[in-house]
Image (cartoon, grey):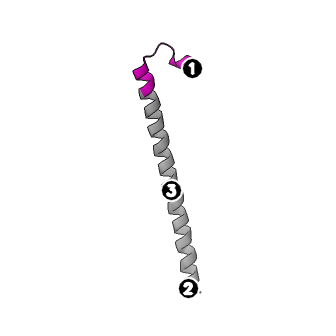
Amino acid sequence: MDEKFKGQTGAQITRKIVIELLIGIGLMALLALIVFGFLDYIHEGIVGIGKMG
């Protein structure tokens, strides 16, 4: 086991891992939304320019 886990119960370790996973997944989802929103915005801009020309 890792040094930082020494002296903790299994429940505390599990809760810590679950919380870290949830935070990680949340951040990844947020990043994905920002990236896809940005790409969609760029695509709309390109289509808009194409329609004008």
Please determine whether, in this image, residue 23 is positioned above or below residue 44.
above
Please determine whether, in this image, residue 5 is positioned above or below residue 40.
above
Q: Which residues are magenta?
A: 2-14
SS at circle 2: helix
Tell me the distance, in whole angstroms, between the alpha carbons under discs 3 and 2: 27 Å
The residue wearing badge 2 is 52
Going by the numbered disc 1, the residue's amino acid type is Asp
SS at circle 1: loop
Which quarter of the figure is the C terminus placed in?
bottom right
Mark with earlier residue (3, 2): 3
Residue at x-position 45% and y-position 16%: 8
The residue wearing badge 1 is 2
Residue at x-position 43% and y-position 33%: 19
Asked whether, in this view, residue 30 is left or right of residue 46, the answer is left
Q: Please, what is the dominant secondary structure of the magenta stretch?
A: helix
Q: Are marks 1 and 3 in contact (CB under 8 Å)?
A: no
- Which image quadrant is residue 14 in? top left
Mark with earlier residue (1, 3): 1
Mark with earlier residue (2, 1): 1
Instruction: Identify the disc placed on residue 34.
Output: 3
